[in-house]
Image: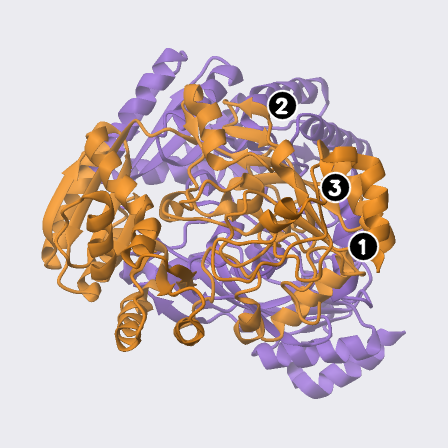
Chain colours: A purple, B orange
Amino acid sequence: MPVPEAIDALSSLLGDRLSLSKPDLEAHGQSETYFTLTPPDAVAYPNDTQEVSAIVKICAAHGCPVIGWGAGTSLEGHALAVRGGVCVDFSRMNKVLSVNPEDMDVVIQPGLTREELNQELRATGLFFPIDPGANASIGGMTATRASGTTAVRYGTMRDNILALEVVLADGRIIRTGTRARKSSAGYDLTGLFVGSEGTLGLITELTVRLHGQPEAISSAVCAFEDIGAAVETVIQTIQMGVPMARIEFVDTPTVAAVNAYSGTDLPEMPHLMVEFHGSDAGVAEQAERFGEILGENGGTGFRWSTKAEERTKLWDARHKAHWACLASRPGAIALVTDICVPISCLAQAVEETRADIEKASIPGPILGHVGDGNFHAILLVEPGNAAEMEEAKALSNRMVERALALGGTSTGEHGVGVGKLPYMEREHGEAWDVMGQIKRALDPDGIMNPGKMVRGN
Amino acid sequence: MPVPEAIDALSSLLGDRLSLSKPDLEAHGQSETYFTLTPPDAVAYPNDTQEVSAIVKICAAHGCPVIGWGAGTSLEGHALAVRGGVCVDFSRMNKVLSVNPEDMDVVIQPGLTREELNQELRATGLFFPIDPGANASIGGMTATRASGTTAVRYGTMRDNILALEVVLADGRIIRTGTRARKSSAGYDLTGLFVGSEGTLGLITELTVRLHGQPEAISSAVCAFEDIGAAVETVIQTIQMGVPMARIEFVDTPTVAAVNAYSGTDLPEMPHLMVEFHGSDAGVAEQAERFGEILGENGGTGFRWSTKAEERTKLWDARHKAHWACLASRPGAIALVTDICVPISCLAQAVEETRADIEKASIPGPILGHVGDGNFHAILLVEPGNAAEMEEAKALSNRMVERALALGGTSTGEHGVGVGKLPYMEREHGEAWDVMGQIKRALDPDGIMNPGKMVRGN
């Protein structure tokens, strides 16, 4: 076994910052969703990049798996230690290294969470807009190419990472990208590491793009008779060039769950929740235009506001929708799906999914980032009920097949991890082999988060 | 020699669509700038992806270099056949394959130029915004990660390519990405091929993101006493969240050249030229806000207009600035530089460059996409004057060193090609070796555009 030898050497390096305690191992072997507990053999808590490099060199020398860990909010089991090994927990590497207001960027360590970053930025007039819901670490969000409710305006992590420092599988430390806003100088290594889920290297420093805090924000909510009318409203709004900052769809079961959980009183119908960022005049104009478009599509109950209190209540309810759905079936665990399709196919994809779930014995509220064509069904399963879990997996499987048949993807923002690995060949065809070629070139011994991402790893 | 055998086989495959004529070879061995004529041994004109695959398989079997060719507008000698071989000219693969207005995307072949694409899109209300000036092919723009005057609003090619079909070095045909707006499904191969300059494969089909034609456009021009005031205006405008579609800087020598060439009457001072896209009210508000900011920074002669005629005249003059600069020294050839720095360092970078050029014996007007921190000096050299060319190269070298010292890049949008290859190690350090590892993994025999991009290739 290579692992005990690596642990001995790591223990000398890190002292009590190498943990072998059972609760700690188990805390790093769980996920927020339905996967089985899969703990690592040890958890390392490095203080800096040089230590990360030293850890990886020791693991490389012994052929010991290395798995990165941010805030543990992944939904696809990215950090499960399926081959054992050492989990590298970045919680001590959570500093803001420099804030550059004129350049609208910030250099940070990977363990910093998005809420911590925005707290640090409060006085600068700038903010980090990517909002996946959970208070994830920025390193983890980068490694999974996360996005969330604001991607329709601000893009995904792919669009907001300017440069990275990465420790490779042999312990080499490289820097990708620069602080320039754009570059044509060679292969986009920054983009390659974003979304690589710790299988090519460990991210130890990030240069992150920031945005100006909007001068004004307006938000609106409205109900629709059916999903098609809601989606048609979204398409027309985008085509009109109205720059939405968020546009979220919640179906009837989600609305019911949110009303019960957050004390809102939305009619139990499909809804869109929208937010606009801009100048005072701009956000008013945008909300009014949106009102016209939804009126033409039969939307009702349209209300918009720039008042912080009303906005906060609305988006707080949306942010808690995941927990509201969980609470709607007390004790349940969730299998959260994450397909993304071309927006012209979105109504069909949501309607077929809705109909499929109606026929099942388990509940599955649907909500999503419809401006991107991305939505989730939160399939609620009784713990230990194998038949229900089978049913949830079958529903999820049909969603993925549906997304791929419509020209979409198995995962819009949650990543591959353990949950979507079975679909990689189906989604990418021979391009999956190219991913394997890149993996083997950069990690020939397969120590970086093994058992994930590529064929036969 | 492997090439003659490959040419025999290609001749059987392509008939008269394999050209060996000297004028054709020379047309494919020249560049728009100062590089020496470097023709290939043959030019192939494939009709479709299957033929491209067959061409690459033949070349792979004989170890013959393969070089892609779009519209020949590259400024860094990307397509020069430095090891000979077969140039694959995509001019026959220039079709629009499908327009998807609801999804705001289009599927095209690589030989289509950006102006042809926008012509095709005219009736749809959509457009392809990336504007490098030249009427480049979209395949070539993708291969070099081009951008131009609108990147500050619409991003670069990296941000506007959703999916690719690529023929690899062994002739395999892969598809990267999907038509979904975002995905977390594995390594970003699309992003890897964007900017890879034909060294990893040949792009044979592209799914390109489109944008809504703006309802209204306003543009403005104003003069500044010095570069610092102009740049400070840009920084403040971006920080205020005013969404500029273009913001261009032209220095005094460029203004003089433009006035002479295009008959404009701008005062001979540094200028900013700006364009806003949005609703009628939005573009008026944006132009007015910009007017307030520049007023605080001592800007003068501010004029803005939404009239198409005035806008067209202004941007036509800007678009012809390259030719205006060339015409300012009759008979000269240009060495065009392309550095990009963090915007906080932009004034310093431009001022030091300006001062450096003033000391030289050759003229070098400066203009740039200042919203991105990217600018060009157009160094004008008498053909055949070796001393002047040495001087231009030394100026260019000092610009790159200055950009790298300021945390920027040697090339913001023109790419590496032959011209920037000497700076790759300096810019990327050990990350350049990682590019080499990826190159060798995907093209072990080094037949794809050899002599470019990576070490020892």
Q: What residue type is labelled 1?
A: Val
**Image position of A219 (left or right of B161):** left
Q: Which amino acid does label 3 sit on?
A: Ile
Residue B224 lies left or right of residue B423; in this view the side is left
Q: Residue furthest bottom?
A: A12
Q: Is residue B355 left or right of residue A391?
A: left
Front residue of this view, candidates A57 and A74: A57
Q: Mark 1 points at which residue?
A: B3
To the question of a shared chain for discs 2 and 1, the answer is: no
Residue tagged by mark 2? A349
The residue at 46%/55% (across/down) is: B413
User: Label 2 to label 1, Cα distance in Å?
Assistant: 51 Å
Instruction: Specify the subunit that label 2 lies on.
Output: A
Subunit of label 1: B
Answer whether residue A306 is visible to the viewer in this image.
no
Where's residue A156, x and y in %? 51, 47
Q: Confirm or deny contact between disc 3 and disc 2 (CB under 8 A).
A: no
Coordinates of residue A290 in the picture (x, y in percent): 33, 24
Q: How far separated are the C-alphas under marks 3 and 2? A: 26 Å
A227 w.r.t. A432: above or below: above
